[in-house]
Amino acid sequence: MATMTPQQALDLLKKQQYAPVYFLQGEEVYYIDLIIDYLENNLLEESEKIFNLTILYGKEQSIAQAISQSKQYPVGVERQVVIVKEAQDLQDLNRDAGQTLLANYIKMPNPTTILAFGYKHKTLSTKTTLSKVLAEHAVLVNAKRLYDNQLPAWISNYVTEKGLHIAEKAIFMLQEFIGSDLVRLAKELDKVALNLQPGGKITDNIIQEYVGISKQFNAFELQSAIATRDVYKANQIIFHLIGNNKSQIAIPLIGLLFTFFSKILLLHQARDKSSQALSQALQINAYFVPQYIAAAKQYSISKIVENINHLQEADMQLKGVAYAFVGEEEILKELVFKLLH
């Protein structure tokens, strides 16, 4: 057995090359859920699951119970499947006795059982005996969060697998609006896919329609208005955002603008200002490089640094750090004024 990427583990599963134990860990819960769902839904027929599929939950069970079930034999089929969801909540997994118990089972597993653990949001210490045993005798999957520059390719591949195409601007909007939350990205893309014919193309207009981004008044349009120092449009958008959003928008908006100005600062400092070099340095699609070059002409380095400070100050105000309470609306109005003037 070995340590694998999520895709490597999935590829082997689809080839019906099974391991007796899977330990799926890491911050990217999308991949953990994806593999767990595959094990739950594809290894047994529906009629076989009654006696041969066991789902356990970390808060309610123990390592001893998971192993006890794994030592049972399947009924009328080649194998049984035992899945421990939310395994990070297993109390005895954090104790030496529990880890030793699991390590001993992994060394000599029941060959007619597939035992899988979904250990979310963190990883086992590589220094533990259990971690070493998992790497040697089981499939150990480390599900790492994607870097920002990996998201466009992930979105494009996900869409391609659904038999669709996607425009570069639509990818950018999804990345900026949703970020690196793969669970939500997949959910939104699935929703969009339901409304398109096979072979269809996801455009920015479709993203705006189905993902819930206002066509004229959204964070991206605000960023665009600020980039061109269009005072009237920026104020029009910020008043609309404040008046039409029931959920808090300030902190995500500040995060978006902080990233924007940070990238313009990098652009100013870049020696190689070719489109390809800037695309790599700023971690953006080359399609959007001209927009950032245009924005850099509007803001000097000193003004960018000043704006980054304004954004950090607004962030602390919103979080109540060393500032008297001020409403979100007032903070955003004042922030936009400071950024533009």
Image: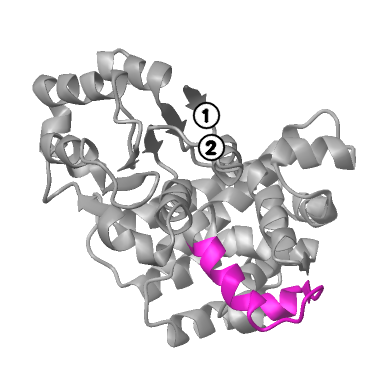
Q: Residue farthest to the front?
A: 76
In the rendered structure, which segment of residues is drawn in magenta?
Answer: 184-207
201 drawn magenta: yes
Can residue 217 be seen here?
Answer: no
Q: In the rendered image, which residue does mark 1 sit on?
A: 4
Residues tagged 1 and 2 counted as in contact (Cβ below 8 A): yes
Helix, strand, or loop for circle 2? helix
Please name the colour scheme applied to the rendered image. one colour
Q: Amino acid at mark 2?
A: Ala
- The answer to whether residue 163 is seen in the rendering is yes
Residue 3: percent from left, percent from top: 48, 24
Using the image, determine if residue 330 lies above or below residue 75: below
| Depicted 155 relative to depicted 126: above or below | below
Query: Residue 118 in the image: x percent, y percent?
Result: 33, 43
Question: In the rendered structure, which amino acid carries the disc numbered 1?
Answer: Met
Residue at screen point 53% across, 47% down:
308
Q: CA distance from mark 1 to mark 2?
A: 6 Å
Q: Pointer 2: what residue?
A: 9
Label 2 Cα crowd, 10 Å radius (few <14 / some 14-19 / many 20+): many
